[in-house]
Image (cartoon, grey):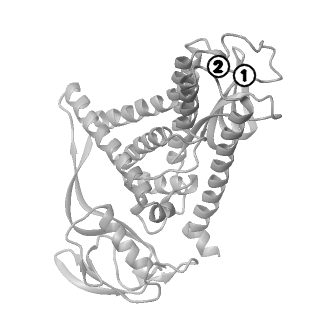
Amino acid sequence: MAGVMLGFRPKDRSHAPSFLSCFFYFSTFPFFFHLQLFPPQIINFQTAGVLTAIIVVHETGHFLAAYLQGIRVSKFAVGFGPILAKFNANDVEYSIRAFPLGGFVGFPDNDPDSDIPDDDANLLKNRPILDRVIVISAGVVANIIFAYAIIFTQVLSVGLPVQEPYSGVLVPDVRPFSAASRDGLLPGDVILAINGIQLPETGPRVVSQVVDIIKKNPKRNVFLKVERGKQDFEIGVTPDENVDGTGKIGVQLSPNIKITKLRPNNVFEAFNYAGKEFWGLTYNVLDSLKQTFMNFSQSASKVSGPVAIIAVGAEVARSTVDGLYEFAALLNLNLAVINLLPLPALDGGSLALVLLEAARGGRKLPLELEQRIMSSGIMFVLLLGLFLIVRDTLNLEFIKDLL
């Protein structure tokens, strides 16, 4: 998931400029995190471009919501850390920073270096609650609109993929010199059964079932019933052992489906197709989030950092253009839905503080307390992001080969 929040970058405990920031540290994918046993070795620039575009759209939402209401804005940044390039226009500093894992929109509220009077009516902190709610939620709204625009563009340009499911799990790719290659598995094979367990259906859950069995059997024979062309036969594969003790056979796995294209005859059909696809993806994101919380102990290991996000996106982009469209739309919807959670480092946490202020009759929490709440959220997200970056980097196949 990714987090966007209203927080502080304190220079001291009593004075700090406000900012809305997007931390693109972790995301849960309802479709993609089960689709492969090994990540691609080459990070795809298309995927990095998608992530950057989503960050810019999110921050632009916050920025425009403030600007159009006459609220003072001091900074617009893509990335964090040292400034690589910047320019100033209309009293706003626009910058690109060293670590492209997020971005932020800065406000001069409580900034000791600002010449703006503390009681200025156009400071964010001095605006009515509704104005602040609009600014805080605008990033989420921007990502939702962007997700729909991506889907609509897909419908008009290449059409919507329609999946016809078949039984089993498809093997689109086999890595050279891997266990699968050594034991005779070929690209295009379909796994119909594993260790005597039939796979009459297809889909991410069936793929996950195959992955789990392989991971649990390092250096032990796994028997696969395989369909190749019009022939069915059994292959014994002995998974190699990962550094973490799990098994791997070096294949890409995907649901066994045939894809056809659904193209609109007119613009009204395009809106109809895009709307259905949008709500379908939204449901999948919400259902994935629900499953994550209901089975947190099992789902926690599937939370992904930016390295894994780019790796998955690179594989998706390499496969089909349709996959890249869906990947981009899902990232936007993930960012939007997760940010509505009432956690300190997310937009939902900022909204919760504003609603608490409204419930208290317009009385704000003490600045010191608000700083502590938001700073703790920032620290948690930063530490989690660092952990995920290290973990996902170590899980890249070419890194494993070096260890």
Query: Which image quadrant is residue 71 in?
Result: top right
Q: Give percent across and percent down for residue 261.
A: 22, 45
Q: Which residue is mark 1?
A: 109
For the residues labelled 1 and 2, say whether their Cβ atoms are less than 8 Å apart. Answer: yes
Residue nearest the observer in this picture, 345 or 104: 345
Q: Give percent across and percent down for residue 262.
A: 20, 42
Q: Is residue 116 left or right of residue 259?
A: right
Amino acid type indicated by mark 2: Leu
Classed neighbour count for the residue bearing mark 1: other residues with Cα under 10 Å, few (<14), some (14–19), many (≥20): many
Residue furthest front as drawn: 360
Query: Which image quadrant is residue 18 in?
Result: top right
Amino acid type indicated by mark 1: Asp
Classed neighbour count for the residue bearing mark 2: other residues with Cα under 10 Å, few (<14), some (14–19), many (≥20): many
Q: Which residue is mark 2?
A: 124
Q: CA distance from mark 1 to mark 2?
A: 7 Å
> Is residue 69 among what the camera can see?
yes
